[in-house]
Image: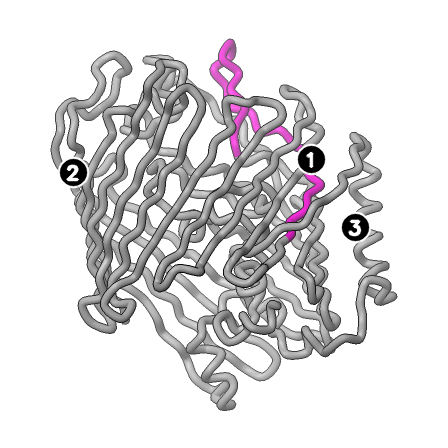
Amino acid sequence: MCIEKKRQYGFSLTGLKKCLATGYLDVFFYRSKSTGYFFLWLIGLTVCTATGVLGNDDTLFFSEIEVGNGDNTDEENSSQSQGLFNYFQFRGSLGYDLDYALSDQLSDFGFSRDESGVSKSKVSLNFSLKKQFEGGNYELGYKGFYDSEGFIESESEIREAFVNYNIYKDLWVKLGRQVVAWGVANFVQVTDIVNPTDQRELGLVDLEDARLPLNALRLSFARERMVTDLVLAFEFQPNRFNVANSDFDPFILLGPSRNELIEDEPKVGLSEPDVYARLFLSRPYGDFSFMVGQAYSRNPALDVQNLKLNYEKYTTFGFAGNYIINAWSFYLERAFKTGVAQIEDRFESVVGFEYSGFRNSQLSVEFFSDSENSNNDFVIGAASRSFFRELANLSLQVAAYRNEAYLTRLSYDFDVTDSTNILFGYINYASGSLDSPLSVFRANDRVYLNLNYYF
């Protein structure tokens, strides 16, 4: 089934993730608190790969996959098929974002913004420099912005900086600053735990754009319908939250004490890296993967008494799978997390489906559940339709939380030219209860405009 997806995604590892993100399989999990089982999983994945126990001889499915080259675009794959290796590829975008807050801010919590008005006027620049060579490629990416109205005035950072090389037969190594995208869900992270995410603007950033790169080493071994990944992350980065007293400050309820918070970040490096492994299998009836990771949580545990943010180390055992029937796609992710001192062992799950049987339209729904805290459960639905020979797209997303909380985002974007895009949007944060997760953000409704020029 994924062979049909090859032309669209070029079968980079990112392409495998997108192909995997369209179906459903069930799974059994083994619960254990012992760190020893973590290493048994790693050994087991290696043995299965080396012996080919989990492989078959149906077709040389992975013989055409550029394993490890997970960030290739369709243009790169096309160029490679023509044998053009000796060139630099430069891609980028220049953008402008304008947001307008529709309501006066709540006066009881200490937000910096008081009245409705422009909340963002941001100019951004993104670009990447790529080069392919015999046996691999390297990439350097940059992202920066200046915002005259936002809570963060400016930011400049290297996004990607890695070398990807085929060191021996089916073995690839990717070293440097990179993004590792696992899992199948479109909106929720369950087994996609390698990279932190940018959560500074609730509901305004899609998951694909929210992942933040890490300095890491990735080893990938492909064998027909099977890929095994081992990832060592040599730095720690928490999820990125907005600054104190901003519209989306997650700790605003602490009041003045919020400015006294101390962040106790763990030490992760070459001698003590975070470790992740994944086994991906593809079969005629569907695709599925098993993963295991031992790493520090990207979300802090709040110690209210000492006003301290702690990051606990835990072990994750996860599964992701899919199944496709005609225009229907069903998928599942489920993960067991253990070892966090301040909370009980927990299962996190997401079940979803997509339907693309309507002309120029797509519908998707996801259900997320947390066995440890049911207040985190929610359902999110999305619908989109393209117009004017796919030059324009109208999309609607609605997330429903417990305690009568709803997040609704409506957007319309249009390709003015091949290199210019304009987007109009509206987002609403509704809360029918003070106990809902969106209650403190209910005055953050806004309209927004995005202009982008691609080069």
Give the image quarter of residue 113: top left
Q: Earlier in the sequence, mark 1 or mark 3?
A: 3
Q: Is residue 71 left or right of residue 234?
A: left
Question: In the rendered image, is residue 271 in sight?
Answer: no
- What main secondary structure does the magenta stretch of the protein show? strand
What separation in Å lies between label 2 and label 3 (alpha carbons)? 49 Å
Which is closer to the viewer, label 2 or label 3?
2
Is the residue 326 above or below the residue 25 in the image? below
Residue bearing the label numbered 2 = 100
Asked if marks 2 and 3 touch (Cβ < 8 Å), the reply is no
Q: Which residues are magenta?
A: 299-321
Residue bearing the label numbered 3 = 42
Which is closer to the viewer, label 1 or label 3?
1
Q: Amino acid at mark 1?
A: Phe
| Residue 336 image label | 1
Give the structural element (helix, strand or loop) at label 1. strand
Across and down, in percent, residue 380 comes to: 43, 39
What separation in Å lies between label 2 and label 1 (alpha carbons)? 41 Å
Give the structural element (helix, strand or loop) at label 3. helix
Give the image quarter of residue 218: bottom right
Q: Is 330 covered by the magenta stretch?
A: no
Across and down, in percent, residue 263 comes to: 49, 26
Give the structural element (helix, strand or loop) at label 2. strand
Residue at the farthest top position: 305
Badge 1: few (under 14), some or many (20 or more) residues near its Cα, within 10 Å?
Answer: many
Across and down, in percent, residue 74 comes to: 44, 75
